[in-house]
Image (tube, helix red, strand yellow):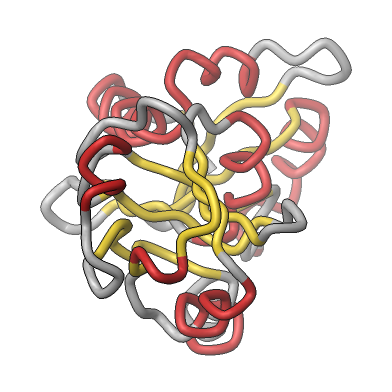
Amino acid sequence: MRPLTEEEVKTLFEKLAKYIGRNITHLIDRQDDPHCFRVHRDRVYYVSESIMRKATSVNPHLMSMGVCFGKFSKTGKFRLHVTCLEYLAQYAKYKVWVKPTGEMPFMYGNHILKAHLGRITEDTPEHQGVVILSMSDVPLGFGVTAKSTQDARKMEPTGIIVFHQADVGEYLRNEDTLV
């Protein structure tokens, strides 16, 4: 486990800002227990500082620690994993609620169509990161809007509203590569 470099911090925070905006400060400056981001084998983990200090004694044999937020590709880009959904849902600026008929298609990896749209946060811009929730406020995944809120109102029912990025179905589909 090592701290992130300045370039890695910039890349990580730019990606997180697409989904939670300025709420990134709530992840770092927590009142209960300070947390930090650490890199281990190209994966970024969000972990409390107290646990991180204790884990340094077993570092060579450590498989993972904390919550995996995503991983860096070989080209230096950052890809969020579904494992960080709990934190994205908690601090998200923009949210999309899906009707019960649209939950399963989304969890199988499909985009969200207008016919499946239950609600959307007002004034959501185009190409903005959003958290996908069921109508009962259960986080299902996250994606990127294809159209703004105003444009989505004028679309036909088969038009794509949100491009799929990650969903809770990945826990089963990609269980080998998540950790």
Image position of 110 with respect to 30: above or below = below
Q: Residue at x 47, y 13 (%)?
A: 22
Q: Position of residue 40 (x, y in %)?
A: 48, 51
Q: Residue at x 51, y 41 (%)?
A: 95
- Quadrant where the N terminus sits is top right
- Quadrant where the C terminus sits is bottom right
Camera-side residue of 140 and 81? 140
Residue lying farthest left? 75
Q: Position of residue 59 (x, y in %)?
A: 64, 51
Camera-side residue of 159 and 86? 159
* In the image: residue 154, left or right of residue 103: left
Image position of 16 with respect to 172: above or below = above
* In the image: residue 151, left or right of residue 25: left
* In the image: residue 31, left or right of residue 158: right
Image position of 22 with respect to 167: above or below = above
Q: Residue at x 49, y 34 (%)?
A: 121
Q: Quadrant of residue 138?
A: bottom right
